[in-house]
Amino acid sequence: MSDTRRLRVVHCPVNTAGVPWANVQALRARGVDAQLVVFNRYKLHPEADWSLERRGGLALRQLTQWRALLQLLPRTDVFHFYFGLTLVPQSVQFPILRALRKKSVLHYLGSDIRGKAPAELAFGKKAGAQVVGSYDAIRWVPEAEVIPPGIDVHSIVPAPPPADRKRPVILHAPSSRRRKGTDHVLAACDGLDADILLVEGLHHAEAFERYREADIVVDQLNAGWYGLFAIECMALGKPVVTFLHDEAVRRTEEAFGMPVPIVSATK
């Protein structure tokens, strides 16, 4: 009799930008027993199946994390880690999983690797596989697999702007003004016959509703690529402007056989 038990995958220990939660939902739709376990719920992306509500000093936080790992080990086949973080210290996390014949994935999300030296990222080779979200990020971890972030487009209804609107609305939603180049965005919009709408500090669901108001969306002018924010806005039918590295555009278009549907801009 064949083993028909579903693959059991735990994504952990953060929900940065909502990417882990989106991946869990996609796996569930394909019949995988997937769940998201986080240290603590994020304000902007609180989604998770289990929050450890990690509190206190280092010793208490470690105790909470070790207890969670011991609970998860017997009922997990694959541990999918994000943002360079593991449930317990990396020095023991990967040896434990290998000894118990558990698979592991280390999934980088951008700012956790950008600008770092190879020696700073060498720990990732201890995982069974490494993943980055773009052909821009792969320059930091050349041996990684590229899996672009995704969203459930079936749940998104396009939101064209009102036909009688007199002035276009330019929307910018920085998670960090410094990293997104917000000062340059505001300076470029100054003097235009347009209204600028800044979306900051909101829960993701609330922020998403604000995105519907935009005529044009400006993502960022520093990083060189785009993320879930741009993808969501494109799904809403909004033209997106962001800074794109030419080499990453070339490799992406070569890999997927289509143009990158974003307007590239510089400061």
Image: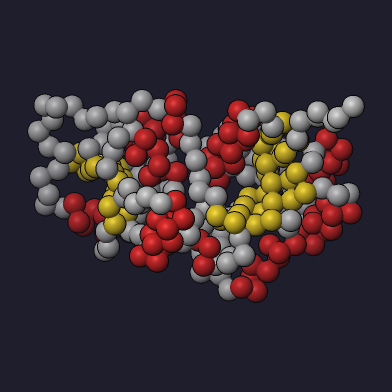
Locate the C terminus by quadrant.
Answer: bottom left
Question: Residue at coordinates 42% horizontally, 58% vertically from top-left?
Answer: 254
Question: Residue at coordinates 72% horizontally, 39% vertically from top-left?
Answer: 10
**Picture coordinates of residue 45 (x, y %)?**
53, 37
Question: Residue at coordinates 30% horizontally, 46% vertically from top-left?
Answer: 240
**Picture coordinates of residue 50 (x, y %)?**
70, 33
Residue 146, image quadrant: bottom right
Q: Nearer the viewer, residue 189 or 82?
A: 82
Q: Is residue 40 visible?
A: yes
Colour mapping used in the image: secondary structure
Q: Is residue 63 visible?
A: no
Is 133 on the left or on the right of 76, as rendered?
left
Question: Residue at coordinates 44% horizontally, 31% vertically from top-left?
Answer: 153
| Looking at the image, residue 56 lies above or below residue 208 | below
Residue 92, image quadrant: bottom right
Is 97 on the left or on the right of 231, as rendered?
right
Q: Nearer the viewer, residue 59 or 128?
A: 128
| Looking at the image, residue 102 lies above or below residue 53 | below
Is 93 on the left or on the right of 142, as rendered?
right
Residue 33, image quadrant: top right
**Picture coordinates of residue 129 (x, y %)?**
69, 56
Q: How many marks?
A: 0
Locate the N terminus by quadrant.
Answer: top right
**Picture coordinates of residue 90 (x, y %)?**
76, 59
Is 115 on the left or on the right of 220, as rendered?
right
Q: Nearer the viewer, residue 139 or 177?
A: 139
